[in-house]
Amino acid sequence: MAIIDPNRDGRCRGGRSGGLRCRGFTEFLCAQPDLGSKGMPRLLRVSADLPVTGSNKVLKRALREQAWRTDEPVFRWVGCGRAQYRRMTEADRREWESEFAAHGRARLL
């Protein structure tokens, strides 16, 4: 699933439902030999209950619309080099959204 990025399309993507902790998921992602640094998600959302259709298919459109604007935990890649994620605060969300304006992409919000 892709979520828009402030300065390019489709860079931040990642979704996980259930009990996997962010650190464990980060270690899993880093161990994947076919996932380069440009493929690492910028945001990770941990959801206990993904929205689904009547036939139990994930409603990706609903997740894209909600993006990082949710009450569920969302983690943002911080720093450079090996991926490290930190849970987003309300200030982080405002900063993330301001990056869209800085890159001329505010219309996508």
Image (spheres, rainbow, N blue to C red):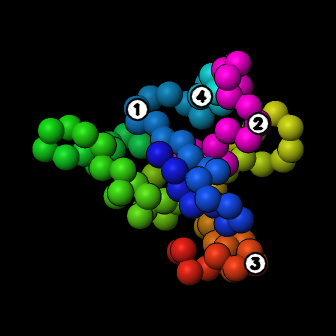
Q: Nearer the viewer, mark 3 or mark 1?
A: 3
Instruction: Label 3: state its secondary structure.
Output: helix
Q: Nearer the viewer, mark 2 or mark 4?
A: 2
Looking at the image, is 19 positioned above or below residue 44? above
| Residue 43 placement (x, y as % from top left) | 61, 49
| Residue 34 placement (x, y as % from top left) | 67, 23
Left or right: 30 as drawn, with respect to 67:
right
Residue type highlighted by circle 1:
Gly
Magenta region, residue range = 30-46
Nearer to us in this view, 74 or 59: 59
Residue type highlighted by circle 4:
Phe
Which residue carries the number 4 mark?
Answer: 25
Looking at the image, is 105 positioned above or below residue 25? below
Left or right: 19 as drawn, with respect to 9:
left
The residue depicted at 46 percent of the width and 36 percent of the height is 16
Instruction: Label 1: state its secondary structure.
Output: loop
Q: Quadrant of the rendered structure where residue 37 is?
A: top right
The residue depicted at 49 percent of the width and 64 percent of the height is 69
Q: Which mark is residue 37?
A: 2
